[in-house]
Image (cartoon, grey):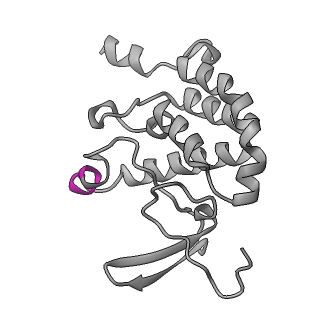
Amino acid sequence: MDTMAKETRLPADVDTQLLVQAAAALQPVLRKYHDEIERGQRMPPALFGQLREAGFYKMVIPRSLGGLQVDPLTYLRVIERLAEGAGSVGWNLGNGGVGQLVTLGLPEDGVEEIYGKRADTIIAGTAVPGGGQAAPVKGGYRVWSLAVRHRLPGSQLDAGKLPGDRR
């Protein structure tokens, strides 16, 4: 029981956590990407790769699935540090983490389907009622939501173009 209690304690100094330090160190890089992110309304592939490589897209995923299973305080501090560099990046990772947490509540076979091949599977969407639209297409659905506006390289979701959309 002591092992479990020790493992679930929050860090005494969250800023000493390696992921928090990595996020803080990335701030100058994020600031350089700010204009490109805003102009293109998408995450530049090189930046996306850096974020994925750093492990930021698997922070909330359990270790049993290959994730990092960080504590909530560390997770929030990483998001905060990234957002200080570029708000859109913090928003993207924050929403993605919430989507991952929601999908971890699926039946075991669904969780395995989503995360069995890679723990840093990206979840793009929103939990806000009425926050998106889905239309049936051959082989699945075309999904649009506010969260998909900042499209990710290699995303399984297609933001599409809605009537009146000026982008």
Image quarter in which the N terminus is found: top left
From the viewer's perspective, is residue 148 above or below residue 162? above
Span of residues in magenta: 107-112
Seen from this angle, which residue lies furthest left? 109
- Residue plotted at (32% across, 13% down): 3
Q: Position of residue 58 (x, y in %)?
A: 43, 38
- Please indicate whether residue 110 sits to the left or right of residue 97 in the image: left
- Number of numbered labels in the structure image: 0
- Residue plotted at (29% across, 37% down): 65
Q: Position of residue 109 (x, y in %)?
A: 21, 55
Q: Position of residue 23 (x, y in %)?
A: 62, 27
Can residue 110 be found in the magenta stretch? Answer: yes
- Residue plotted at (25% across, 46% down): 116
- Residue plotted at (74% across, 29% down): 28
From the viewer's perspective, is residue 153 above or below residue 31? below
Can residue 149 be found in the magenta stretch? Answer: no
For the residue pair 113 and 43, the one nearer the viewer reads as 43
Q: Position of residue 105 (x, y in %)?
A: 36, 52
